[in-house]
Image (cartoon, helix red, strand yellow):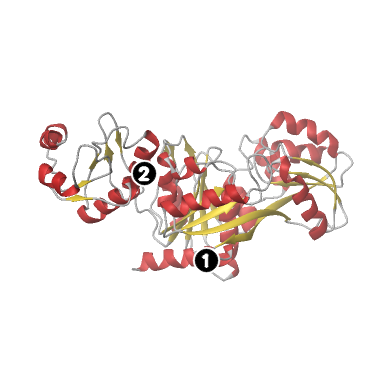
Amino acid sequence: MRAAVDHLPEVVPGAMVVGAAFLGGGEKLTGVDLLAAALGVPVVAGDGPDAALAEGLRRFAPELVVDLSDEPVLDSRHRLRLAARALAAGVPYRGADFLLTPPPRPRLATKPSVAVIGTGKRTGKTAVSASLARLLAARGTPPVVVAMGRGGPPEPELVDPAAFDLSPAGLLSLAASGRHAASDHLEDALVAGVATVGTRRCGGGLAGAPFDSTFAAGVALGNKRPEGLLILEGSGTAIPPAAADATICVVPATADPELVTGYLGSYRVLLSDLIVVTMAEQTPTGGTSETGLALLEKSVRGLAPGARVVHTVFRPSPLESIAGRRVFFVTTAPASARGLLVGHLEREHGCTIVGTSHHLARRPELAADLERAVGADVVLVELKAAAVDCVARFALDRGIGVTFCDNQVVTTGGDGLFDELALSTVDLAVARYNS
């Protein structure tokens, strides 16, 4: 190890070792003091590798972390978790045959900003973002949402719901022009009723950086708006390539804790001030598992003890009254949630559900399901995936009404109510921006 330290300037020209973090593996050592004497630099330790690296980052404020560890002290999962901790601190992480650099997140916003990111696709990120936008609008401080997606417009597009035709017919006309008429920014504008900017991205790195995007230009467009806050919405596992003053991370209860808090997945959690666990009544098998949710929460809190955690579920909320109507409901929610969702719609909205499809993101199956909607008065559908070019077209061609629905965030547990925690995260962002 001393030889490697001595040779480091040959590998990284100009490098100067300012300290070391002892990760474990003491069969060849009699103590940390001996290691410090042998290396000739200060050495820190901690209650495990995570804590040791965190203390090293805090104490030494390095410009680069060089990994001299090996099996069996660290396996690939834990090694990448350490890399994620360095990246979250803005420090590159280098090993014998790899170099990981922090995803570029330059300061682009000229007003306070909150990022809403997720651990994957179909986590409920757009629903959480739209709910936050509605909460802000209700208290008199509407935001501008800047969203990105693989189906976003070629150039950044501002959508003002007061002037943009977001009706089923209007969106179908947009789809006919070759556009993805269920893009996230259109959903945000429709269900939250706030100005949104749509941008395009392609690809996503292990730590969430998009390979290519128009997001910077989208933020510039949002900066010109009179609203005093930006919501920067991620896409899948991709993180908005712009600095945010606070971050909300959306994690489905069905997620594998090992992927959420291990490997480079932990980078997203380490960036976050609020963790929103969605679909808290579901497990991968469709049942209820407090044990699975408890394990996920324990993993998240162990990795980021300063972050707050809230458990939530989604409940469909039609944007128009469907009382007394015969309704065919189309959603991206899994079939295991059918009973919950149908019961909620019939009980809370006074309708009769005559059929459902859980294949909104699977076009062949969706087309077959829609044939059972002919007896309905109205099709109720989320503005996602094939909602416009398949569902709306089918319904309008047959004289069936189309109503879009939102997914309301309902708190089921955690550190408080979603509404209060989300708004306090915004207040935190404003305070950081002004400090």
Pick the residue in front: 150 or 70: 70
Pick the residue in front: 280 or 179: 280
Q: Quadrant of residue 304?
A: bottom left
Circle number at residue 423: 1
Tag 2's secondary structure? helix
Indicate whether 360 appears above or below 163.
above
Q: Position of residue 309 (x, y in %)?
A: 51, 58
In the picture as drawn, the residue positioned furthest to the bottom comes out as: 139
Pick the residue in front: 265 or 325: 265
Indicate whether 345 appears above or below 372.
below
Kindly report which numbered mark, 2 or 1, lies closer to the viewer in this rendering. 2
Q: Which residue is mark 2?
A: 84
Q: Position of residue 89 (x, y in %)?
A: 31, 51
Tag 1's secondary structure? helix
Quadrant containing the N terminus is top left
The Cα–Cα distance between marks 2 and 1, rounded to whole angstroms, is 27 Å
